[in-house]
Image: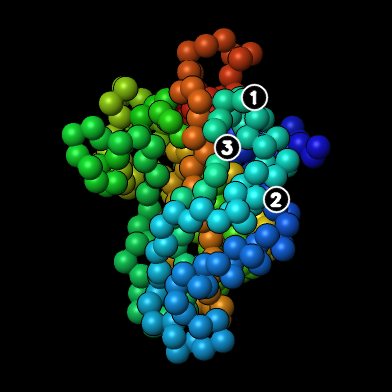
Amino acid sequence: MERLTSEEISNFIHNGYVKIENAFPTEIADDCRAILWKVTQCDPNNSASWKQPVIRIGELEHEAFKKAANTPILHSAFDQLVGEGNWLPRVTLGSFSIRFPNKEQANDTGWHVDASFANEEVDNYFEWRINIQSKARGLLMLFLFSDVSEKDAPTRLKMSSHFDVAKILEPEGEKGLSFVELAQRLNTISAKEEVPAIGKAGTVYLCHPFIVHAAQNHQGIMPKFMAQPALLTRNDFDINKATTELCPVEKAILIGLKM
């Protein structure tokens, strides 16, 4: 079974992400893309039918998506990054944002960090929260179902921004911050190198749960098909345990707090 190298794990800790090419077969990517085309009700051969800059699709329980998320190389990487067995297998891939070439600008391109647990008092995603233990969330994952070049609206990742987010979250304790509260504080982060999440269909980016990222408008020719689910954890992270027991996600949080 192919495993992440020590260099790849070090890059994940310090840069906030690792890119895995051929994480799932292109044939599965093709199957997933065909399903998504049908759900969008757009014609892949008629760009006049692509009338919106982005179409959002909810959970889909097709077997193709389950296969994409459960390849041996991904399972091995999950063990290496969040702790062996400390994750829940994905049976779906969450929601999808399909981005189309369009003169209209999308309204969801702001910098943010994905929240991980619900606010018990408010049933609204923008009130979901994130805390220093990254309660419930092990990774942010970007699954590419189409080839994505720099013109095809790749997700923008702020390299090493997870360190800064750790410092923002630490004083907030167990309660943490809401999605909106954290987004409003990201302007305090110093300038970071932006990395576009580009790659061939079948590529997966595994990102630290604290990484700052943003969508962007499509400047290419063919629509971009991607999912960005969370990898959920069985047990919350614990940055207070012995150093030898820390997984890479936990090590990165501690490094951020000490910087």
Q: Nearer the viewer, residue 68 or 83?
A: 68
x, y (%) of residue 183? 31, 46
x, y (%) of residue 231? 52, 39
x, y (%) of residue 197? 57, 57
Which residue is pictured at 50% across the width and 29% down the height? Answer: 233
On the image, which quarter does residue 248 sit in?
A: top right
User: Disc 1 marks which amino acid?
Assistant: Glu
Q: Which residue does the numbered mark 2 point to in the structure image? A: 23
CB within 8 Å, label 3 to label 2: no
Element on which disc 3 rests: loop
CB within 8 Å, label 1 to label 3: no
| Mark toward the start of the polypeptide (1 vs 2) | 2
Quadrant assignment for the N terminus: top right
x, y (%) of residue 27? 72, 63
Q: Which residue does the numbered mark 3 point to in the structure image? A: 89
Q: Residue furthest top?
A: 242
Q: Nearer the viewer, residue 105 or 193?
A: 105
Q: Residue furthest right?
A: 1
User: Disc 3 marks which amino acid?
Assistant: Pro
Q: Answer left or right for 204 relative to 60.
A: right
On the image, which quarter does residue 50 sit in?
A: bottom left
User: Disc 2 marks which amino acid?
Assistant: Ala
How packed mark 2 is, by other alpha carbons closer than 10 Å (few <14, some 14-19, many 20 or more), is many
Element on which disc 2 rests: loop
Q: Is residue 43 above or below residue 114?
A: below
Q: Is residue 181 above or below residue 220?
A: above
Tag count: 3
Q: CA distance from mark 3 to mark 2?
A: 15 Å
Mark in front: 1 vs 3: 3
| Mark toward the start of the polypeptide (1 vs 3) | 1
